[in-house]
Image (cartoon, rainbow, N blue to C red):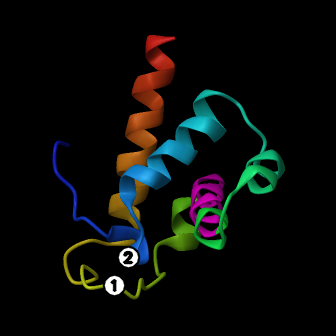
Amino acid sequence: MTCHNPGCLGNYDFDQIAFFARKRFVEGCQTVTLLEQARSQREKEEIALVCMLDIADDQVRDLQLSCRHSGTCKVTTCRNMLKNMITAELAVQ
């Protein structure tokens, strides 16, 4: 996908969440380490969203995000984008 809704995942920056997803799943940083290195409460929240990738899709499918894109962008849309990104980057390694 070349486009996403800016501010998706509950008004968080998808690119920043993708950064932490790469750190966690591609580089292998542990969640606790990422949380310890977080520079702000917002970064901790973004890391927490990344951790939700470990939860099965059927467990988060009914989550309702509180953001301006909730009508067009569901939590599974962003999860799928992140999972596809991680899978592609791991395939290159």
Residue 11: say if magenta: no
Residue pictured at 41% horizontal, 70% vertical: 9
Q: Amino acid at mark 2?
A: Asn
Q: Position of residue 53 (x, y in %)?
A: 58, 54
Going from N to C along the chain, the mark reached first, 1 or 2, is 2
Badge 1: few (under 14), some or many (20 or more) residues near its Cα, within 10 Å? Answer: some
Magenta region: which residues? 45-55
Label 1 secondary element:
loop
Q: Are the two marked residues, 1 and 2, in contact with CB atoms closer than 8 angstroms?
A: yes
Compared to residue 26, the image places residue 63 above or below, namely: below
Q: Position of residue 15 (x, y in %)?
A: 38, 50
Which of the 4 image quarters holds residue 44?
bottom right
Residue 46: say if magenta: yes
Query: Which residue position is annotated with label 1?
Result: 67
Q: Quadrant of the N terminus?
A: top left
Which residue appears farthest toward the top when viewing the image?
93
In this rendering, position of residue 11 left or right of residue 71: right
Q: CA distance from mark 1 to mark 2?
A: 6 Å
Compared to residue 12, the image places residue 30 above or below, namely: above
Q: Position of residue 17 (x, y in %)?
A: 48, 54
In this rendering, position of residue 28 left or right of residue 57: right
In this rendering, position of residue 41 left or right of residue 10: right
Q: Position of residue 42 (x, y in %)?
A: 58, 70
Query: Which residue position is annotated with label 2?
Result: 11
The secondary structure that dominates the magenta segment is helix
Q: Amino acid at mark 1?
A: Cys
Residue pictured at 78% horizontal, 42% vertical: 30
Residue pictured at 24% horizontal, 79% vertical: 69
Out of 82 and 47, give the one closest to the viewer.
47
Residue pictured at 44% horizontal, 12% vertical: 92
Badge 2: few (under 14), some or many (20 or more) residues near its Cα, within 10 Å? Answer: some
Label 2 secondary element:
helix
